[in-house]
Image (cartoon, coloured by chain):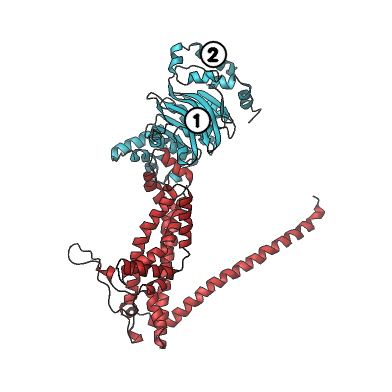
Chain colours: A red, B cyan
């Protein structure tokens, strides 16, 4: 190459770089669309509901008078339903994921199971509601209770937990596994001492992302018959007498945040719209807090696990 | 000058061979029947590979290998990439059992109990408890230095803290790592340098007193200084444990081993004392590989 070619080369570079610029702009606009839409919704809700965000809003039951209505039964209901969801989906999902990755031999049956699990993640949530109505509410006789709702949402996020568990396990390098097996560890010892601890951050992240999806779910909860007007709290899980733990609350009727919100938005009075906006703001904050936890886990727990 | 001395020494050793030693060393007879010149050493045979073939699915990766591994000696497996040396090494602790579609034929007998390591009746976990392995890439667990070394003892049910402390210290001393880590035993193992990590992996194996220690290209991911420290360590360990090492570095094989096996395309081409293989190889192929004309 001689120096006379340099202008030509510069021209080529300039032309090639034009596409860099075009993509950078297009990508930024796409990003902006998502961020701005969310921000607009969030700010709108905060603005509309701001004056309703008083301490009483969290400690009052719903009321016919908008100014006295609160979200006490809704946030307690959401919390308890999420508890049942986590307690049912996490052990089942993690166990299934570990089994599929570590124990199951790779054959046609496990391939079919794998496809099924992936497809389950795409089933509309209302279908889970219908299933739960038949199985949990009537079949097992759990009724329109926190237990039914928690198990329904547990089913809903089960595929998410399974997929997250498998991804986390797959990211453990082969040579770490071989090191453990090479010392004479059994499959269970490898799973207990290595696979589970090293994949825990990934599993937890998946669980929380699943939960933050579940907390906003309305359709399946309505299907199984959540009530929209609840002016009582479920029985306390801790009692004064032996065995100090009570499971009465599982059978209690309930409402959750998105249903409370839905109920208020369907009222004609302007004041209830404010309540709905305030409840929506709190619900988004709950979801954001969960996602923040997931991010925190990713950064702080994962930093101890390097290969 | 140096090489001719070595040659004479090895010749003398060959002269000392006795018929008893010959018959004691199982696996030698089959070696001779394959036309490979067998050299007899006074060290007893710790493990004997007998007519061993290995298949990855339908692909025959190893073809009727017979080879003695002498007790408390270092045996090196050398050969070009894809010759099957790592495959052979990994058969010694049944690593191939972890993956589907692999099949063994023949035997690897571990003495003195004459257990065939490859027999379907022998639990691979039992084999791995007797035979330790150090891998190509240092692979400490993302746990503390202490827990890495203690892990082999823990899975054997050892829970006594003072026993664990003693054995961890012993193993780290044995791997020439103790002085570097004694004040930070509970720091993460991944914070160590590559060479230290590899010595930690050796300590992890030593903690459970394996009968045989397998090294699968243990220095290929390390810099020259770390490599030298690992080689020094192998030198020290040969008095305590039987060592089998795969290396693609011929100088390393010459430096650390007592015996060398040259493999090519899944076959054992030549086996003998390292001094003989490097100075006076019997086969033309071995000579070509060693002198760098091929491979």
Can residue A81 be seen?
Answer: no
On residue B11, the disc is 2
Q: Is residue B278 above or below residue A294?
A: above
Q: Considering the numbered disc 1 on the image, is that residue within a helix, a strand or a loop?
A: strand
The reply to whether residue B238 is in sight is yes
Quadrant hosting residue A151 = bottom left
Is residue A193 depicted above or below B210 in this figure? Answer: below
Q: Where residue B115 sits: x, y (%)?
A: 39, 27
Q: Residue at x 32, y 38 (%)?
A: B164
Which residue is pictured at 38% across the width and 41% down the height? Answer: A185
SS at circle 2: helix
Q: Which mark is residue B245?
A: 1
Marked residue chain, label 1:
B
Q: Percent x, y for residue B132?
A: 42, 34
Residue B88 drawn above or below residue B277: below
Q: Measured from the top left, where is residue A121 in percent x and y?
A: 46, 63
| Viewer-proximal residue among A223 and A262 | A223
- Whether discs 2 and 1 lie on one chain: the answer is yes
- The residue depicted at 47 percent of the width and 21 percent of the height is B27
Question: Badge 2 local density, few (<14 within 10 Å), some, or many (20+)?
Answer: some
């Amino acid at each position: 190459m001689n120096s006379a070619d340099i202008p030509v080369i510069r021209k080529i570079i300039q032309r090639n770089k034009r596409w860099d610029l075009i993509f950078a702009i297009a990508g930024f606009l796409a990003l902006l669309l998502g961020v701005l839409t969310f921000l607009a919704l969030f700010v709108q809700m905060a603005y509309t509901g701001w004056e309703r965000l008083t301490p009483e809003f969290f400690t009052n039951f719903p009321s016919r008078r908008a100014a006295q209505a609160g979200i006490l039964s809704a946030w307690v209901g959401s919390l308890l339903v999420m508890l049942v969801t986590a307690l049912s989906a996490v052990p089942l999902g993690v166990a299934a994921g570990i089994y599929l990755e570590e124990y199951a031999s790779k054959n046609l049956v496990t391939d079919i199971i794998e496809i099924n699990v992936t497809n389950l993640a795409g089933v509309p949530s209302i279908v889970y509601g219908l299933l739960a109505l038949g199985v949990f509410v009537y079949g097992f006789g759990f009724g329109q209770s926190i237990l039914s709702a928690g198990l329904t949402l547990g089913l809903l996020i089960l595929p998410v937990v399974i997929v997250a568990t498998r991804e986390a396990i797959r990211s453990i390098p082969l040579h770490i596994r071989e090191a453990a097996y090479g010392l004479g560890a059994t499959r269970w010892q490898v799973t207990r001492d290595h696979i589970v601890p090293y994949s825990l951050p990934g599993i937890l992240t998946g669980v929380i992302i699943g939960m933050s999806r579940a907390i906003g779910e309305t359709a399946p909860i309505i299907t199984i018959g959540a009530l929209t007007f609840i002016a009582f709290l479920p029985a306390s899980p801790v009692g004064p007498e032996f065995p100090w733990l009570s499971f009465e609350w599982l059978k209690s009727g309930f409402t959750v945040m998105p249903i409370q919100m839905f109920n208020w938005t369907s009222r004609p009075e302007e004041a209830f719209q404010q309540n709905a906006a305030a409840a929506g703001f709190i619900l988004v904050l709950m979801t954001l807090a969960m996602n923040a936890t997931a991010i925190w886990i990713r950064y702080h727990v994962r930093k101890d696990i390097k290969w | 000058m140096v090489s001719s001395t070595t040659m004479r020494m090895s010749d003398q050793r060959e002269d000392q061979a006795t018929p008893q030693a010959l018959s004691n060393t199982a696996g030698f007879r089959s070696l001779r029947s394959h036309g490979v010149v067998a050299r007899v050493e006074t060290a007893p045979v710790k493990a004997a590979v007998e007519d061993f073939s290995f298949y990855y699915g339908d692909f025959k990766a190893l073809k009727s290998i017979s080879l003695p591994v002498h007790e408390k000696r270092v045996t090196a497996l050398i050969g070009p990439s894809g010759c099957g040396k790592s495959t052979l090494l990994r058969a010694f602790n049944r690593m191939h059992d972890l993956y589907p579609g692999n099949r063994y034929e023949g035997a690897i007998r571990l003495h003195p109990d004459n257990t065939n390591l490859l027999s379907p009746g022998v639990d691979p976990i039992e084999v791995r408890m007797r035979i330790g392995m150090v891998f190509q890439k240092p692979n400490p667990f993302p746990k503390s230095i202490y827990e890495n070394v203690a892990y082999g003892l823990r899975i054997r049910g050892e829970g006594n803290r003072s026993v664990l402390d003693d054995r961890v210290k012993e193993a780290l001393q044995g791997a020439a790592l103790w002085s570097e880590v004694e004040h930070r035993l509970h720091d993460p193992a991944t914070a160590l340098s590559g060479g230290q990590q590899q010595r930690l992996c050796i300590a992890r194996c030593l903690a459970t007193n394996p009968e045989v220690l397998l090294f699968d290209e243990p220095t290929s991911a390390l810099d020259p200084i770390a490599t030298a420290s690992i080689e020094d360590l192998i030198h020290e360990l040969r008095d305590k444990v039987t060592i089998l090492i795969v290396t693609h570095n011929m100088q390393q094989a010459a430096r650390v081993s007592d015996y060398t096996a040259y493999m090519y395309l899944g076959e054992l081409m030549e086996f003998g004392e390292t001094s003989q293989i490097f100075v006076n190889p019997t086969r033309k192929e071995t000579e070509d590989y060693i002198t760098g004309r091929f491979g």
